[in-house]
Image (spheres, grey):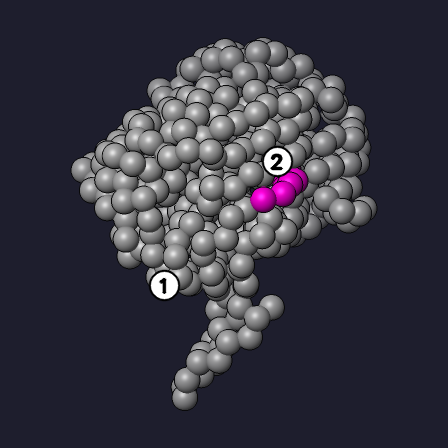
């Protein structure tokens, strides 16, 4: 007997009210491993309730760290007891960001053994730039049967690292490995995303010497000791953008709280071109629609450009706009896997390589669909909210990797959505709402 969780959405409800944004997934999945580098306990606040955090905490405990839940969204991590530099395969394969344990463990122990990462199936996302950075810092790397072995003969030393392409993961891993290396490390062609700045700020609060995070050149002077700290993770810009699009797709009026508006500039710019009204405040934005949605063209780029993690969501919104829109994917491979699912809901989308052409129909119809990755799942949630009829979304574990209680937050805004457990038996299927 198998069980599967699904979201069931009755569309057509207008979203109104307020929603609180959680801590940033893309920051916390690097900050949690970074605590391994601390020589004293750390308290991390504003931690989102998502499955990627659960996996990270499980890995920390498997390595020997003491992780204590202090209250809502707050954990204390005491990594002084970490006694292993090997991340178990079963845990690592469930999460793409498990590769941050490479940099953290290498920085502490000067060697590590980590399984090749899992996560969303978004095409070929190699770790060659990560390994290039480790080699520059003095490590030898070997990939054998899905395991990455990284060792150093004489410890890590400062180096000049130039990335062949802008890469968030490799930039963060290089920071993690270099923060306790001997001498000065200079990272050029570094990624500039807010979560890179957040990781650097967390490490600096412990006594690291990292300069230039948020620019394309980062300088790190290695230190011998990192003290404990208390640190709050930044708000999640992609979660905020997702709720902004959901509000617009339903013609609603929603105040989105606990955000950093500057991090949302590229999202706000595109949405305003589509005809969405956005008011900005110190730590919140209000999204409303008082006219028709209109076509536009969007190209995803590294920060500060429009984020690839918002591409599926904005595509769902453009299905509801008037006219022909074009989306060009400039960052990730195979980001258009969700298109077939939107077509099941009546979307008119044609894909040619990294370009999607969307003929806005102004409406979508509920249908059974399947989330193929995290952001695709968010796009289907948005489509289901705006569609007429009932939408059932399978494989919602993808969504729960990066969104904290998405169904609950949407219900609080007026959505009609349930999370159901489907029990499949040989004689039939039974559903129970949970």
Name the residue located 58 percent from the left edge and 38 percent from the top edge: 254
* Residue underneath mark 1: 368
Q: Is residue 188 above or below residue 149?
A: above
Is 428 in front, or is 182? 428
Q: Is residue 313 visible?
A: yes
Name the residue located 48 percent from the left edge and 80 percent from the top edge: 430
Q: Helix or strand or loop: what does disc 1 sit on?
A: strand
Name the residue located 52 percent from the left edge and 27 percent from the top edge: 278
Q: Is residue 109 visible?
A: no
* Residue underneath mark 2: 255
Side of 255 relative to 385 (left or right): right
Q: Which callout, 2 or 1, points at the residue further toward the start of the chain? A: 2
Q: Which residues are magenta?
A: 16-24
Q: Classify 10 Å Cα crowding around label 2: few (below 14), some (14-19), many (20 and above).
A: many
Q: Classify 10 Å Cα crowding around label 1: few (below 14), some (14-19), many (20 and above).
A: some
* Residue 168 colored in magenta in the image: no
């Amino acid at each position: 007997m198998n069980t599967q969780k699904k979201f069931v959405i009755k569309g057509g409800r207008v979203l109104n009210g307020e929603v609180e944004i959680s801590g940033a997934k893309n920051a916390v999945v690097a900050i949690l491993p970074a605590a391994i580098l601390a020589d004293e306990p750390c308290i991390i606040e504003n931690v989102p309730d998502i499955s990627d955090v659960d996996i990270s905490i499980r890995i920390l405990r498997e390595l020997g760290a003491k992780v204590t839940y202090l209250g809502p969204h707050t954990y204390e991590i005491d990594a002084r007891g970490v006694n292993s530099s090997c991340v178990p395969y079963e845990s690592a394969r469930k999460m793409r960001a498990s590769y941050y344990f490479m940099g953290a463990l290498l920085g502490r122990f000067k060697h590590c053994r980590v399984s090749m990462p899992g996560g969303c199936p978004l095409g070929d996302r190699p770790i060659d730039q990560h390994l290039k950075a480790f080699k520059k810092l003095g490590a030898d790397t070997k990939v054998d049967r899905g395991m990455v072995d990284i060792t150093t003969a004489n410890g890590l030393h400062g180096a000049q690292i130039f990335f062949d392409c802008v890469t968030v993961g490799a930039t963060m891993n290089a920071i993690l490995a270099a923060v306790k290396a001997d001498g000065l490390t200079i990272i050029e062609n570094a990624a500039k995303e807010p979560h890179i700045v957040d990781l650097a700020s967390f490490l600096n609060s412990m006594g690291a010497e990292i300069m230039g995070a948020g620019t394309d050149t980062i300088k790190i002077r290695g230190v011998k000791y990192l003290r404990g700290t208390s640190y709050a993770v930044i708000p999640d810009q992609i979660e905020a953008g997702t709720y902004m699009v959901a509000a617009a797709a339903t013609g609603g009026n929603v105040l989105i709280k606990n955000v950093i508006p500057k991090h949302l500039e590229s999202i706000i710019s595109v949405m305003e071109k589509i005809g969405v009204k956005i008011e900005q405040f110190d730590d919140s934005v209000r999204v409303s629609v008082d006219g028709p949605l209109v076509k536009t063209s969007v190209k995803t780029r590294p920060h500060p450009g429009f984020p690839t993690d918002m591409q599926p969501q904005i595509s769902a919104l453009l299905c509801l706009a008037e006219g022909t829109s074009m989306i060009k994917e400039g960052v990730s491979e195979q980001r258009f896997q969700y298109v077939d699912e939107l077509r099941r809901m009546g979307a008119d989308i044609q894909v040619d390589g990294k370009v999607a052409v969307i003929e806005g129909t102004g409406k979508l119809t509920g249908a059974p669909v399947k989330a193929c990755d995290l952001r695709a799942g968010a796009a289907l949630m948005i489509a289901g909210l705006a569609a007429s009829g009932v939408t059932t979304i399978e494989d919602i574990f993808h969504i729960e990797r990066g969104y904290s209680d998405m169904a609950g937050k949407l219900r609080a805004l007026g959505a009609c959505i349930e999370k159901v457990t489907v029990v499949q038996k040989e004689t039939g299927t039974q559903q129970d709402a949970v």
